[in-house]
Amino acid sequence: MLDGYKIIDADSHIYEPHQMWLDYLEPAFKSFALSPDLKIRGESIVNPSGDRLRWEAGKQTIASHPRSWLNNFDAESHVQAMYQMGVDIAFIYPTYFSWIIGIDTIAPQLAGAFVRAYNNWLRDFCSYNPEILRGVGVVNSHAPEEMGSELQRIADFGWKAVFLRPNPVKGRLLSDSAYESFWSACEELKIAVSLHEGTHSRSPTAGSDRFQTRFALHACSHPMEQMMALLSLIEGGVLERHPNLKVGLLESGCGWLPYWLWRLDREYEDLQWEVGDRIKMKPSEYFRRQCFIAIEPSESYLPQLIDAIGSDNLIFGSDYPHMDHKPNIVTEVVALQSQISEEIVHKILWDNPACFYGLN
């Protein structure tokens, strides 16, 4: 709690220790364990990003959270960082696993082994304090037939959300028919779906065919992949067929959203004849009914955005402990009460993420 506000961090991360892959991968797959230099059997899991980027990222992370770094970002240091920020509950997302599952050419069987290893390890990580460390499970989108069974396992853990990347996987969009039973299972089990992009991944990613710097790639990948993912869920009829499905759009900012909803509504007005069999109402209405988006407190247009789309669909994520994370970010969100009402700040920090994650 901070300044009287209870706080849910809707997007917190861990750095998976390299030893965990050796400990948690099944025996047949241990030779594929991720190495400390982010390689699987000598092949990098990320597109080239440069030694200087890794050095700068490491410096920023160490400077922001020296205790967490010294303790290898273990569960105890994670909880201590939460206390320092004023966070009451944190939902935990991957770091290295996001790049692993983002390798478009990875064999489905190997991807499944990494999925099971990660979920098992995260369960043990969160067991340090399961009331405040909430796991977000992962599934194998490289083998759609496996997604339902792993989702059930996630639900059996008591987890309320599952992580997906927004990118195409082996040519399949999120609206591909291969995922239809997965969406049904998410609805039935009341598991929210969190879409979260990762720059430098070896998957089809916005901007990667044109740019090489992190400056450009990071600017493109997060918002543009989320825009296209939302479009896919609407245009493909997923949100129409699954009205109780909850979808979160994380770490992309929210300034693009009013334009994108206006654009999609405008296209629908002109072209309803083309997509009317699977889109029965305005795209913006699907978003308001089923979707949530994470804000950044430095987005100076938040009051205008709230005027445009309302405040019921806004949540907050700290991005701890990544290089983009600022140690005072929670304080910055609370300070928004000078621009928007205390009631809306409370909704962003607690009510809305509690609704998204299905907390009592």
Image (cartoon, rainbow, N blue to C red):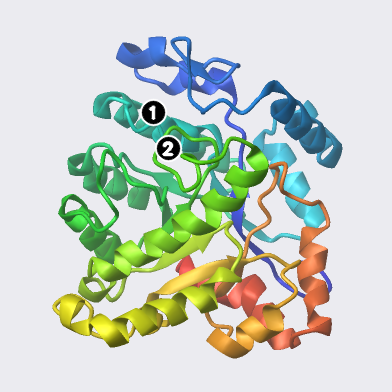
Which one is nearer the viewer's eye here, 284 or 68? 284
Q: Amino acid at mark 1?
A: Phe
Give the quadrant of the N terminus: bottom right
Which one is nearer the viewer's eye here, 41 or 308? 308
State which quadrant residue 36 falls in: top right
Secondary structure beneath dot 1 equals helix
The answer to whether the residues at label 1 and label 2 have Cβ atoms under 8 Å apart is no
Q: Residue at x 50, y 48 (%)?
A: 197
State which quadrant residue 338 falls in: bottom right
Q: Amino acid at mark 2?
A: Asn
Q: In the image, 228: left or right of 349? A: left
Which one is nearer the viewer's eye here, 247 or 78? 247
Foreground label between 1 and 2: 1
Residue 154 in picture, x, y percent from top left: 36, 47
Please give the residue where the numbered disc 2 appears in the rendered image.
Answer: 119
Which one is nearer the viewer's eye here, 351 or 63? 63
Residue 322 in picture, x, y percent from top left: 69, 42
Please give the residue where the numbered disc 1 appears in the rendered image.
Answer: 114
